[in-house]
Amino acid sequence: MSAPDRKPNNVSLKRNLSPGGREVRESLRYAGLIQQALLPDKKLFEMLVPDHFILFMPRESISGDFYWIARNNGNICLAVADCTGHGIPGALMSFLGITFLNDIIRNGHTNKANRILNILREKVMNALQQTGKNEEPRDGMDMSLCLIDPAERKLQFSGANNPAYIIRNNELIEVKPDKMPVGISATEERSFANREIDLEKDDRLYLFTDGYTDQFGGPRNKKFKYRAFRKLLLDIHTEKMEKQRLILEQTIREWMGKEEQIDDILITGIHMKPVLK
Amino acid sequence: MRLSGFHIKNFRSIVNTGCDCLSPDNITALIGQNESGKTSVLEALYSFSRGSICEDVLRSDMSFPEVSCTFTAEPDEIESVLQKGMLLEEAAHIMRKTGKVTLTRKWDYNIQSNLFLSGNEVTAVYDDFYSEVKEKQENILEKGGELIEKEEETIKLINDLEKSLEELKKKRNALSGKLSKTIKLSKKRKQRNNREKLTASAEAINNDIRNLEELKEQYSSMLDEKKRFIVDNEMLNGYAKQTLQLAEKIEQNSPYYTDNESKTGLSTEILKKQLLYKTFVLEKFLKGQDLFSAEKEAAEESEAIEKYTTREHAGKEFFNLIPGFEFFEDFSSLLPNRIDLDDIFTNNLKAEGFKAVKNFLMVAGLEPGFFMQSNNRILKQKIENLNGEITVDFQEYWSQNVGKANKIKINFELEHYDYSHPEKKGKPYLEFWIKDEHERLYPKQRSRGVRWFLSFYLELKANARHNEKIKQVLLIDEPGLSLHARAQEDVLKVFEDIKESMQIVYTTHSPNLLDMNKLYRLMAVQREQKSNYTSETVVYSAQKLHTTTNDTLSPLYSLMGTRLWEQPFVQKKNNVIVQDICSYHYLSTLYRLAGRKGEIFFIPATGISGIAPVANILLGWGVEFVILIFNGSNKTEGGTESKLVHFADGKCNSGSLVTVKKFNSPEDLFSTLDFKKFILNKRTGITGTNSTYVEENNMSRELLSASFSSYVKESRITLDDFDEETIENITRLFELMENSLAAAAQNNGNMVQERG
């Protein structure tokens, strides 16, 4: 169990702003604080998923990635999202995402993971006035969303471009997402798929954005890539959650070396043992 | 193959039509105001088939035209191309499954076009395929890079080892010198102690030398091993270096030389093909294969990929199977009064009305040789019979009467010139008549409308007969301009008759050329203002008609409200009164679509207040019914239920009223996604209920529901096309209604018994 690492990385912002931009920097820092306040409360996380970690490394003071958790009719609803862009545009989109998710759960619209994503997409399209015309903004978010039923030991997963990994008996199971975002896309909207999985006590569930795997670095300055990420998770999944977070952070920092962080990084890991009844 | 849809970009006033579906029953009408761009749509489709365009069609922003056509193909047609093995298996699977082929023709700045296989799903498969190949390529190159790194490390190690060995040699030499000195000194020392010390020291030096020798031995063997590694892998490393250099060159070139020749004189495409081949060789080389076999296998593998990736090649193969496109602007060749048989035999195109006569003979099923018949009596008899057949056929389409009940007849006769034409005396000619009961007139003596229709009838029928085996797409610009309303309806009859062998896409302003019961046949073309200075043509498919302007829809509005009497309504039992015509359209359509075992007959009332009178009539007639109302938000008139119960004056039992509290109206039965897809046909974010969206956006519920109904009638939608949410909602509703009807039947039986 660990608290999320919310230490912002100000390197690039500091570099980009002239001395006269101090006010802007201050505003961004403050915006970052507001964004942190919008993220789920640490206590709520610990109450719903006691054994977990969150590795959250925003590229700027504010981030386009966000995580979210809520209780929904006895289920635990968990999401990890990557909004288009990073910095200010990404953060604005993340504000929308968090607000809409809260709204959907509060109104008790549904208890299906895919329907939550379907409704969220409608709200995003409506807010951004997206109707599929060429000149419109194509903003949106990629998201992994899970509904965990602790009593029935079931997991519903619905993914918008982002998968989920479950590690069970030293084997990594990839739960595939739909290849479309939450927001307008090139093809007509169709329902997100609802994937149901029976959970086992010792399962580890990982939700993440693509910031980790897309990070450049290493001896040949290449992306970290999913293959290496999966191997790393398989190697460390038996470690305690907090240690897993440290290893993941240390590995990506070493990989990055002197390279700039190119995107926000977010990974959450959950050990199912204390969650399932 | 059958043309099922199109997507036009950058053609005259058209910027992007989006994907538009043609009517499934082969007749599609384009409606819209003048200058809206209807003819441009026809021209674009025609250009797709011909491949050529004139500069007039280019837009001022110099964006180049692109026309995609989607065809529905028979399985054997698809197989005939797929069996050639040029498509990716997954793409082939999609085409087999959907039975659809999309081809795109794109023009460039030279007004040359490129034709290729397209379509979202197929393109996505190819994109995935390209990324997989790219990923594989990257992995191999990464391994190649690792190998080179290892080689560099080894070379460094060899250098270090050689240095170390050199140092060891020096150390050894130094120690040897030291040892000789020590031995000499020990011999000179007389004192025993000193001698023993020096001997021990010499022994230690000796040990050091032995150790150094051992170390040197180890280093030498390591050095040999590393050198062997370099020699053994020389070829492999060399190949890896070459391949990586090529990859880097492409990476540097690609932003600047994507389409043109690169600095090397080779296009990036050719370099990429080379890289693909070299990467595959490297992969096999890395696995330990010899260069010869690696090259052989890699050549086969890259050739297979290149074969797969030719979407252009596949496009051309499918293009050979598509129907022919014909563009008719005017039926200018009118039937003449007479034509010499010599002109027919010699194919004299300049003869007046030659084409119309050829069409006439084709429709009559006559070859020119028919007139060679020597027996004049038999010939005349056959002509008389044919006159009867052609007239009967023509009268099936031409419904106007001359006077009260007088129909016109088409006649032709074989005659010979007499002395009044001395230069042609004795030569045969065909004479045409259009007769009615009162007079027999030459075609030219008849109205322009009759002559136009006759020419149109002959041309289309002849074309259909001529191309019985090859399907055709006829593009017709404003047919029947000079015709009476009734005759325009007759044009539709001709379309209906030939639609099995031909697809017709036509433009019109006339309501008489539209069929109210077949709204799915309509597409609206509208010019929309994009800024103060620019406008563009937008095409709306049948399902989006409600979003067009009143002016665009004016032919349709002229037709609305007619022929509703054709619907069968009340039955003895299983009647359901619904609150309005929209509920009627949605529920009757969904019930049919759901394929339920029972039967329900929906009766539309004129709003909630209209339900009571309808129910009273049905009570009076003694038929079984239930009333269905949607009352989700309780927004309907106050005390609705009490009013409804009141109407029956206690005779209507409570089971007769079914109130759906979950939804405001039938529109809410659809999931938001299905509502957008099948009813609105629009991509927008809907955050409230569907019914609220319709209300807030001031949309015509009548048009939406009627369009949906006619769309489903043509089986374009099946129950499986809806998502689980919609299916769940409609299944629950119909179960509820069937149960209520069963209860109503039970109660009715009881009441009859009581009366008895």
Image (cartoon, helix red, strand yellow):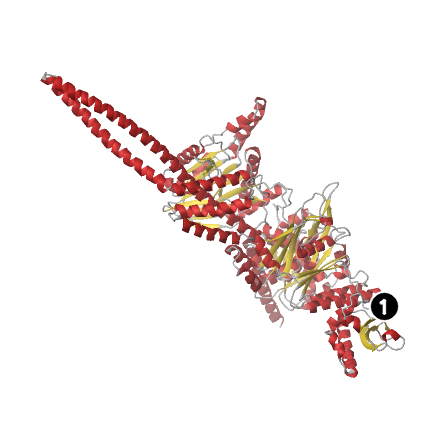
Residue A111 left/right relative to B633: left
Q: Is residue A49 visible?
A: no
The residue at the point 56 percent across, 60 percent down is B81
Q: Quadrant of the N terminus of chain B?
A: bottom right
The quarter of the displayed image where residue B405 is located: bottom right
Q: In this rendered view, identify the residue nearer to me: B663 or A218.
A: A218
Q: Can you give x and y, in whole percent of width and height, for residue A100 in the image?
A: 56, 41
Which chain contains the residue that carries disc 1? Answer: B
Task: Check the image and report above or below for B369 versus B524.
Answer: below
Q: Can you give x and y, in whole percent of width and height, for residue A45 in the image?
A: 45, 37
Task: Check the image and report above or below for B710 versus B233.
Answer: below
In the image as oriented, which residue stretches furthest toward the right? Answer: B420
Q: Quadrant of the C terminus of chain B?
A: bottom right
The residue at the point 60 percent across, 69 percent down is B749
Number of residue marks: 1
The residue at the point 79 percent across, 83 percent down is B377
The quarter of the displayed image where residue B679 is located: bottom right
Residue B185 left/right relative to B348: left
Q: How would you rate the neighbour count of disc 1 (Cα within 10 Å): few for under 14, some for 14-19, many for 20 or more?
A: some
Q: In this rendered view, identify the residue nearer to me: B552 or B294.
A: B294
Considering the numbered disc 1 on the image, is that residue within a helix, a strand or a loop? helix
Instruction: Name the residue type under label 1.
Output: Lys
Q: Is residue B340 visible?
A: yes
Q: Can you give x and y, in whole percent of width and height, for residue B414 in the image?
A: 81, 77
Q: Can you give x and y, in whole percent of width and height, for residue B369 in the image?
A: 73, 76
- Would you name the residue on which mark 1 appears? B444
